[in-house]
Image (tube, rainbow, N blue to C red):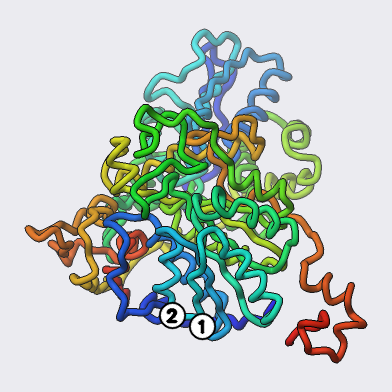
Amino acid sequence: MVETGKTTQEFEIRDYLRTELMPHFMCPGCGHGIALRALLWAIHDLGIAKDNLAVVSGIGCSGRTAAYIDANTIHTTHGRPLSFATGLKLARPDLHVVVITGDGDSLAIGGNHLIHACRRNLDITCVLLNNEVYGMTGGQVSPTTSAGRYTTTTPAGNHEPVFDACELATAAGASFVGREITMHVTALRDLFVQGLKHSGFSFIEVISDCTEIYGRKNELGNSPEMVMSHKADIRPESYGNVVDEPFRPTDLNVGVLSQTDRPEYYTAYRQHFGKQVEGNDDPKKGGAVT
Amino acid sequence: MTRQGVIAPVEMANTAPTNVLVVGVGGQGVIMISKAVARLCQENGLEVKQSEVHGMAKRGGSVFSHIRFGQEVKSPLIPQGEADILLAMEWAEGLRWLPYLNPERGIFIADTQRIVPPFSCRDRNRGAESGYINTSVQELVEKVPNAFAMDATSVATELGNARAANTVLLGALSTALEFSQEEWHRVIAEAVPPKTVGVNKEAFVKGRHWVESGETATDFSSDNVISLKEPRESRLEITQAWCKGCDICVKMCPERCLQLDQHQIVQLIDEKRCTGCRLCEWLCPDFAISVEAK
């Protein structure tokens, strides 16, 4: 983990945005903007310099958010931001690598990459912005679309069971798994702070919302109602973190859901190939540029 | 602290029951005190009826407990104006229950500690007046003949455990009932957690001595009352070009001081109402609002 310096300066989001690209392309009331603020806030609170931050994103509304961050950003192919990030982190372990991905990006098309990134436990922070739909391509059904919800490809309502992304990541071996809703901005920021501090793969699911395409079709109300509605989905704390019915929209567990102390991939890699890597900066021969 | 002579014990030989009303705030030990009193009376062969409301009070809410004992007790509730002793662990709670105190011979024992609930001030602006009752000890003493107000919480804090304030007050109460100090010590030891028996005994003795010794003390200060003197100015800056009129800030603003104009762009309609809570800034997905709190 890279050392971070504490900052006392007040957070001003414009310092972290490419203001020439603003206003961003996202629809009015899109939850991704709130999640982006929380992420940048956490980065500010940890005192991570913009030059030491690399944000990797895939395709989709979530993927587009990275473009507005004034840091090192890569906009990669659909479903593969984690693969790019893995390569980046191994080549430049001094960087804080954050992956911003969406439910379609990382659970459908990039599902394989997600579980293997979790399994490897490389020190990456993966932010999954879950809005239950493929928003950018016109509102197709995604692996997290709740039962009965209408999308352009499920005109009679979705009948498929959904993925619980956090359960999936925990099972695949992610050492830090958390979930929060966009309404809880400060809690979301604190979760990001914990995830960024964690050494190992940290997976954070943000329950975001798609007002224009998903909300309108399902009559979920306007932006304020949609943002507030997730509060009602949260599972009461007294129920504990036992997931017996892993289907949304009710019984949503929030906060840090699991945190384990597994060996971080890069550290383990250096130990395993220590002799070969020592004094060897040729990546083709198993060395790494440090 | 203020006092008016030593407490004259309540006559328990009468056929009418003796009424003790214990009031306070959730978490202060109202129920513990009333259990101790009730048990002691029961062990002395008196008929005791105790009834309390605690469930809905939660921590910080109003809690009260009626204790009635005597040769024969019929109803568990004390009628208005018939409480012989009113023991209040919080200043405003004591004043709230004053109508229950016997206006002629009722004994009022209260902690001058003020626990100001957040909702006593519904005006969220800086510098707003608190709605907490401002009756001072002197004003109360003029109204109630047998008033004993002491800073029991500070006494207990000096002993090392602020939560023993209720036992300090019980010590003061004990002088009004004809039971021996040893009996009191025994019931307290049974009622409190084993680790705190020592400090509770000390607290009890302090409370009892305070009544018996007649030492003079000062009125409670207003130090512990939160006052927001300086009005805070906040400046709300709206980047109109970035606003998409999603309505989130308008609906989320607790003061309702934002509005969408005819172009569906947010505008501040009342600068004075803005308290600088920053909810609009945090929840704006388009980063169009920034609040600068001074």
Q: Residue furthest right?
A: A275
Q: In the rendered view, does B4 fall on the left or right side of B200?
A: left
Q: Which residue is drawn at 31% across and 43% down?
A: A225
Cα gap from disc 1 to disc 2, whole angstroms: 7 Å
The image quarter containing residue B106 is top left
Q: Residue at x 52, y 32 (%)?
A: B22
Count of numbered tags: 2
Q: In the rendered view, does A96 fall on the left or right side of A90?
A: left
Q: Pointer 2: residues within 10 angstroms few (<14), some, or many (20+)?
A: some
One can see residue B209 in this view: no
Eyeballing the image, is A264 above or below B60?
A: below
Spot occupied by residue B38 in the image (x, y as percentages of width and height):
64, 23
Q: Do the residues labelled 1 and 2 touch (CB within 8 Å)?
A: yes
Q: Pointer 1: residues within 10 angstroms few (<14), some, or many (20+)?
A: some
The residue lying toward the viewer, choosing from A186 and A208, is A208
- Name the residue carrying label 2: A70
Q: In the rendered view, does A80 fall on the left or right side of A274?
A: left
Q: Residue A4 carries which label?
A: none
What quarter of the picture does the C terminus of chain A occupy? bottom right
Q: Which residue is drawn at 48% across and 71% down?
A: A75
Q: What element carries label 2?
A: loop
Q: In terms of sequence position, does the residue under pointer 1 or pointer 2 come before the other?
A: 1
Amino acid on which disc 1 is placed = Lys
Spot occupied by residue B266 in the image (x, y as percentages of width and height):
18, 62
Q: Do labels 1 and 2 share a chain?
A: yes
Spot occupied by residue A192 in the image (x, y as percentages of width and height):
56, 63
The residue lying toward the viewer, choosing from B91 and B178, is B91
- Name the residue carrying label 1: A50
The image quarter containing residue A83 is bottom right
Amino acid on which disc 2 is placed = Asp
Q: Mark 1 lies on which chain?
A: A
